[in-house]
Amino acid sequence: MQSFALIGLVVLLATASAKGAAVDSPKQGIPLPSGSATPAWPKPSVVELPPGALSIRSGGIELVHSLDVLGGFEVRVNGKAMAIGQNRPILGYVRGGEFRWLDLAEAGKRKIVARRERGALLVEFQCVDADGGKWSINQRFAPGHIDSTLDVRNEIICDQERSVAFLPMFMLFAGTGSFGSVKGQGLLAGLEYLENEPSSSEADVIGPA
């Protein structure tokens, strides 16, 4: 059984760590099969959140989660929608020399349970891939130790060995369904400011020689 865990310090910052044996260590890695291609990425959309949807709050930050959609949550700041989760997640793995994409929103034998427990919001998702592997995704959202932050834990387990090529542990889409994609403020103001335009520097896309 392979297990991965992601622990986020705050809503918009997360670090990843492995729990248990890694699927592929640097010494055991395998190349992607020839002809592997990216899929037509399904776009996430705003999920309807009824009055009875589960929520967790820390100061001015609130996360409201759907009862039946993995990643179907909305992050609000002082009552205003600011971001949504990845509610159309896809993962990729290699099995028997073939590259496979698994659309979690369309996978077989899907099951999801969302509930509150001891001040935290828990989401448990299960599905089966095309090769019979059972995937379990367990998410925990809780108020952070710092005011207006959320601790996020995301654990992904497969009961069969998988060589994982693409595994989106946790994703946020800022502006979807609210202020949109137009940039109006630099993330690192003073270092570089962009008014809804691409960077003129290649330093952010070209690594060391």
Image (cartoon, rainbow, N blue to C red):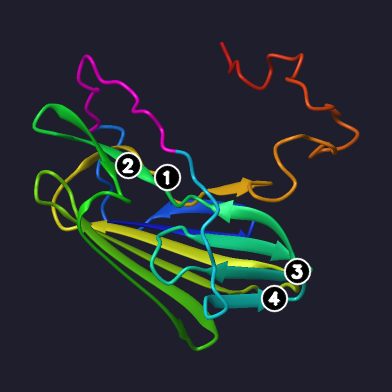
Give the position of the C terminus as an image quadrant.
top right
Q: Which mark is residue 93?
A: none
Q: CA distance from mark 3 to mark 4?
A: 12 Å
The reply to whether callout 4 and callout 2 are in contact (CB within 8 Å) is no
Give the position of the N terminus as an image quadrant.
bottom left
**Which residue is label 4 attached to?**
58
The reply to whether callout 2 and callout 1 are in contact (CB within 8 Å) is yes
**Which residue is label 3 attached to?**
79
Q: Say whether residue 175 is left or right of residue 78.
A: left
41 and 27: which is toward the camera: 41
**Which residue is label 1 attached to?**
168
Q: CA distance from mark 3 to mark 2?
A: 32 Å
Q: Which of labels 3 and 2 is toward the front?
A: 3
**Residue 190 picture quarter:** top right
Please, which residue is most extreme toward the bottom here?
Answer: 118
| Dominant SS in magenta | loop
Which residue sits at x=42%, y=72%?
A: 67
Three-letter amino acid code at disc 2?
Leu
174 and 53: which is toward the camera: 53
Q: CA distance from mark 2 to mark 1?
A: 7 Å
The number of numbered badges drawn on the structure is 4
**Image position, residue 104 (x, y; %):** 31, 50
Q: Say whether residue 63 is left or right of residue 89.
A: right
